[in-house]
Amino acid sequence: MKKAIIILAIVTLVSIIYATTMTVHTSSGDVDFEISEITSITFESDGGGTGTVTDIDGNVYQTLVIGDQEWMVENLKVTHYRNGDPIPNVTDNDEWANANNGAYCVYANNESNVDTYGYLYNWYAVDDERGLAPEGWHVPTDDEIKQLEMYLGMSQSEADDTGYRGTNQGSQLAGNAALWSDGALENDPEFSSSGFNFLPGGYRSSFNGYFGNLGYAGYFWSVTESSTSLAWSRELYYYSTQVNRYGSSKQSGFSVRCVRDSN
């Protein structure tokens, strides 16, 4: 077998040496190139590589390369900081609304929601120096989320704007139509096309600690402050194909997605 492989390689090499043209077969037809004019051949990919990452609690998350970034495609479920310290689980509404330290909860304080939607975290947990993300990963900056949005077709000026921006980037980022209320978001033909698979996990209010919008909207944090009391976040809503960028109270309870550290 090894001898046959060597002979085949020699025959292939000889064929290349004596060839004068190279034909590339594409979906839209064949393209011929003069061998003498080819200086190099580069194979490129638009991403799409998949993997996994494990947090300190042993939760395993699916990941996906989108453009030049690798993202978790599931919401965070960790209950400890990276150094092993527990994150307070706050169930009381008033305590949640008045917190100025890291905290997490599950929607409606119902643990059956964790497997699908993960936990909700306030911004203080996101920003804690002990680390919320797994080793080698981090909660994205506002600019890193913009990079994702622009890869999916937003312009720089749209990404820098506030409110609902872009065209259908929200639909591209969302996933699992069965969980979303019927509306423009899931009816867009590019729904779920990015593989980011963001879900309508709802939120917890910074005003009164109440929960809302499960099945209607999903929210996720950036680590970037927009003011002393607010931080940049993103919202996907069932009635819009766009992505809402706005500064939210740091006491709000939102989902968290993590992005891999750049080399």
Image: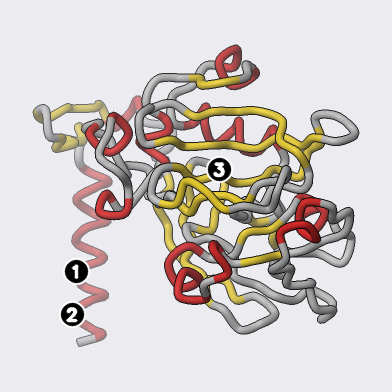
Name the residue rendered at 69%, 58% in the picture: 121
Q: Quadrant of residue 53?
A: bottom right
The Cα atoms of the two marked residues, 3 and 1, are separated by 37 Å
The residue lying at 46 percent from left, 69 percent from top is 113
CB within 8 Å, label 2 to label 1: yes
Give the residue at mark 2: 4
Marks 3 and 2, the one that precedes in the sequence: 2
The residue singled out by tag 1 in the image is 8
Amino acid marked by disc 1:
Leu
Regarding mark 3 in the picture, which secondary structure is present there?
loop
Local SS, label 2: helix
Q: Earlier in the sequence, mark 3 or mark 1?
A: 1
Q: CA distance from mark 3 to mark 2?
A: 40 Å
Q: Secondary structure at mark 1?
A: helix
Q: Residue at x 49, y 41 (%)?
A: 67
Residue 43 shows up from this direction: no
Q: Residue furthest left?
A: 29
* Left/right of residue 152 with respect to residue 123 in the rendered view: left
- Amino acid type of the residue tagged 2 in the rendering: Ala
| Residue at image location 65% in from the left, 66% down from the top | 105
In this rendering, position of residue 108 left or right of residue 48:
right
Q: How many marks?
A: 3
> Which residue corresponds to mark 3?
68
